[in-house]
Amino acid sequence: MQVVADIHIHSRFARGTSKDMNFPNLEKFAALKGVNIVGTGDFTHPEWLKEIKSELTDDGNGLFSHKNGKTRFVLTTEVSNIYQQDNATRKVHNIIIAPSVEVVEQINERLSKYGKLASDGRPILGIPCTQLVEEIMSVSPDNVVIPAHIWTPWFSVFGSKSGFDSIKDCYQDQLKHIRAIETGLSSDPAMNWRLSQLDKFSIISNSDCHSYWPWRFGREANVLELQQLDYKSLLSSLLSRDPKKFLYTIEVEPAYGKYHFDGHRDCNYVLDPAQSKKQNSICGVCRKKLTIGVAHRVEELADRPEGYVPKNAVPFKTLLPLSELVAAVVNQQLGTKKVWDQTMKLIAAFGSELNVLLEAPEIKLSELTNPALVSAIMKNREGKIRVKPGYDGVYGVPLLDEKIEIRKNPQTGLGQF
Ligand SMILES: [Zn+2]
Ligand SMILES: [Zn+2]
């Protein structure tokens, strides 16, 4: 069976997260988006784990159900490893996936020695990634550790501010347990294919959302062929690197991510990697060093030219969320009633947002909505919507016309996530 899985999300117990991130909402929005398997997120948090245990039913096969029985949940969390290595501070985020509540309780007991699990849904642990992997894998060989959004500047294995140039330097003798990496919003598989050091990993994509709003939840996801709906089959496909089992990933245009180009948010200053190199990545406003974005960092570490495609690579589809298209067409902010109503009308007609984006016939769309939106949906399906690149924490902005910037000031507040 074909499933869509978004396994990296956060509960309301994580910092900067919508207070409505609870299981009823997650289930509701998973159905609207067309996501079948959702990570619980934050299983390291005692209060959220209580809710996992009281609100979800254990299917007995490593997956969990909520009330309507359609959405499945898998136990996941993200931790922030902050430590010193080779005279530098390292900050790396890791996703952990576990097969049962019993295993999660053992993981939490061990990790509580290294940080305050109750302080944040994504706790800070004062141990190196090597020690994290060792601890997690010694609890159960069915556990999985995945380096999260590997390119973001501040908190990732390749991050320009606190990471490494080689994944081996980070995970060392524990690299044998690492089987996948997460691209993050600002990079897509094609960018990652340019590094031969990543060839042996499955390339996965998740939303990392902090709110269930339809332009966040499931904006990146994994489309998998599963033998059965259980933990073992899920992981077998997710880690397979086999396009027969891992059909494709859904990716936003990397420029949409908030760390694509180099820049300074406060100085309202942005440069592409080539321009940035020319001026030694110095800000034209405050004269300080710019926050180096993902595109620049990939260029630094790549050992292959742009456009390189490995043999048997799992393909991907570039797709912006429907709400973004509607917002651009009606020229309003994402959270407005008009954007919401038009988005929901189409979702209601075709069953889910992914159905609208990927499958809805043009002719049927035309019966329900205006030509500008139909054209945006068709263009999006071909991955042809241009995006004004994001930088230093500012999201990119979709452009429907080459010259006109449709929407200014993408988001504020929770919009940061
Ligand atoms: Zn993270
Ligand atoms: Zn500046």
Image (cartoon, rainbow, N blue to C red):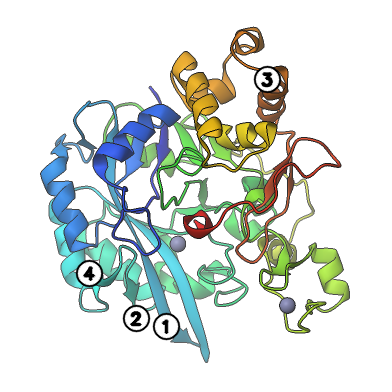
Q: Nearer the viewer, mark 2 or mark 3?
A: 3
Q: Which residue is mark 4?
A: 118
Q: Nearer the viewer, mark 4 or mark 1?
A: 4
Label 3's element? helix
Q: Position of residue 59 (x, y in %)?
A: 16, 34
Q: Which mark is residue 126?
A: 2
Q: Position of residue 164 (x, y in %)?
A: 57, 74
**Which quadrant contains ligand 2?**
bottom right
Label 2's element? loop
Mark 3 touching mark 4, by CB under 8 A? no
Q: CA–CA distance between discs 2 and 3?
A: 50 Å
Q: Say if residue 155 shows up in the picture.
A: yes
Q: Which mark is residue 83?
A: 1
Label 4's element? helix
The numbered mark, 4 or 1, whose residue comes first in the sequence reads 1
The numbered mark, 1 or 3, whose residue comes first in the sequence reads 1
Q: CA–CA distance between discs 2 and 4?
A: 15 Å
Label 1's element? strand
The numbered mark, 2 or 3, whose residue comes first in the sequence reads 2
Q: CA–CA distance between discs 4 and 1?
A: 20 Å
Q: Which residue is mark 3?
A: 374
Mark 2 neighbour density, 10 Å: few (under 14) some (14–19) many (20 or more) = some
Q: Nearer the viewer, mark 1 or mark 3?
A: 3
Mark 2 touching mark 3, by CB under 8 A? no
